[in-house]
Every structure is written in C-alpha cells, then in structure tokens.
Amino acid sequence: MEKVTGIGGLFFRAEDPAKLASWYEQHLGVTLVPTDYDQSPWIQQTGPTVFAPFEQDTDYFGDPSKQWMINFRVDDLNSMVAQLRNHGIEVSVDQTHYPNGRFARLRDPEDNPIELWEAAK
C-alpha cells in the first residue's frame, strides 16, 4: 500500500491572510508562502506528526467553534514561551511532564488554537 510521507500544507480561512501569515513568521518562524518557484517554502525538521480526528464535542481546542488546532514541535519549550511572552503573547504552559514531552497553548491573532510540543528527551 502506498502511504503519504508527511503533511505538505495546512490550509485554512483567515480574516486577514497576509497579516496572519506575517504573525506566524514573526513569532513562530513559519516562512511565508513563496511568491514564485525560485523561493523556498517553510522546511520542517524531520520528526513525528500526529494525525488525530477528535469528537465534535471535544473541549481540547478550547473554543467549540474552532474546527482545527495545529501542534508545532519545538526544541526548547521554555525559550519559545519566553520569546512569545516577550512579544506580549499569552501562553499557557501545562506543568505536567508527559511520557511524550511537554506542552504549551496559545492563540493566534484570529483566536485559532496552537499547541507547542517539546518531545521527551
């Protein structure tokens, strides 16, 4: 059986796509979509990706009107959280150390949920 080899993109609606894309680049380092074929898109580090549908009534994403949440892998959760907070971005760090690592939550300027994950070392 052929299998997909990873996530090639995440596409979603935004009230102000250019502004939101700039926020992701400035605060999380997600490179803007190239405007021509000579530019490179955001390149991810190799690592695990979880693909997990949730029940319609889950509270895991927070706001029940949100249909998706993205989880970004990070190398150093404490440093990333400090960087975000230095820019006035509210971040909630889960104090539990899980077998698979540590997590933090924030929201982008359009209130979409984001989870940060530092894998267990």
Image (spheres, rainbow, N blue to C red):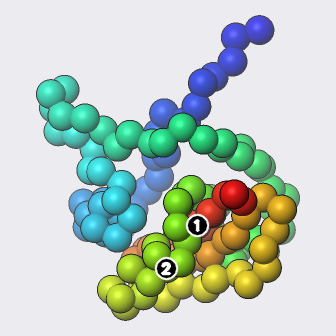
Say if 120 sits above or below 95 in the image: above
Q: Residue at x 47, y 52 (%)?
A: 12
Q: Is residue 80 left or right of residue 51?
A: left
Name which quarter of the figure residue 23 lies in: bottom left
Marks 1 and 2 in Cβ contact (< 8 Å): yes
For the question of whether residue 63 can be seen, the reply is no
Say if 43 sits above or below 4 in the image: below
Q: Is residue 58 left or right of residue 7?
A: right
Q: Quadrant of the C terminus?
A: bottom right
- Residue 4 percent coordinates (x, y): 63, 22
Say if 16 sits above or below 88 in the image: above
**Residue identifier under label 2:** 81
**Residue identifier under label 1:** 116
Q: Quadrant of the N terminus?
A: top right
Q: Earlier in the sequence, mark 1 or mark 2?
A: 2
Looking at numbered disc 1 in the image, what kind of residue is underneath it? Leu
Looking at numbered disc 2 in the image, what kind of residue is underneath it? Val
Say if 64 sits above or below 95 in the image: above
For the question of whether residue 41 can be seen, the reply is yes
Farthest-out residue, top: 1
